[in-house]
Image (cartoon, rainbow, N blue to C red):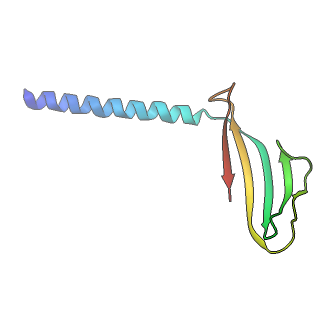
C-alpha cells in the first residue's frame, strides 16, 4: 500500500510541475512584440557616435551624430527595441537586442 501511495504522490507532483511549466510557457507564447526602435551605432575613439538607419522612438532623423564622430571606430552596435503590449498593456515591457 505504501508503494502505491508513493507512486501517486510522485505522479501528482510531476503533473503539477508540468502544469505550472505549461502555464508559464502559454503566457510567454501569447507575447506580441512590436518593434519600436532600430538603429546602427558606430562609436569612435574621439568620444563621438554616428547613428544610421534609425527609425522609431528617439530618432531625430535617419542619420545623426553625437559629439566628434571621427578617429578610429572602436565598436558598433545593431540595436532593436521591442515592446510587448500583450503582457503589460499599460506599462509595456521593453526588450533590447544588441548584435
Is 9 situated left or right of 85 in this image?
left
Rendering coords of residue 48 (x, y %): 83, 63
Look at 68% across and 56% down and name the residue there.
98
* Residue 50 appears in view: yes
- Residue 74 or residue 35, whichever sits in front: 74
The N terminus - image quarter:
top left
The C terminus - image quarter:
bottom right
- Residue 13 or residue 39, whichever sits in front: 39
Rendering coords of residue 25 (x, y %): 50, 36
Is 39 situated left or right of 85 in this image?
right
Look at 68% across and 26% down and name the residue there.
89
* Residue 33 appears in view: no
The image quadrant that residue 13 belongs to is top left
Image vertical order of residue 27 relative to residue 96, above or below? above
Is 36 situated left or right of 11 in this image?
right
- Residue 32 or residue 1, whichever sits in front: 32
Rendering coords of residue 24 (x, y %): 48, 33
Amino acid at each position: 500500500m505504501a508503494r502505491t501511495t508513493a507512486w501517486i504522490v510522485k505522479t501528482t507532483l510531476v503533473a503539477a510541475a508540468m502544469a505550472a511549466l505549461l502555464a508559464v510557457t502559454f503566457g510567454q507564447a501569447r507575447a506580441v512584440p512590436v518593434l519600436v526602435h532600430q538603429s546602427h551605432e558606430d562609436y569612435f575613439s574621439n568620444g563621438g557616435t554616428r547613428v544610421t538607419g534609425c527609425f522609431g522612438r528617439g530618432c531625430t532623423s535617419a542619420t545623426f551624430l553625437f559629439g566628434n564622430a571621427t578617429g578610429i571606430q572602436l565598436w558598433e552596435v545593431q540595436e532593436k527595441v521591442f515592446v510587448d503590449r500583450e503582457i503589460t498593456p499599460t506599462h509595456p515591457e521593453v526588450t533590447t537586442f544588441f548584435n
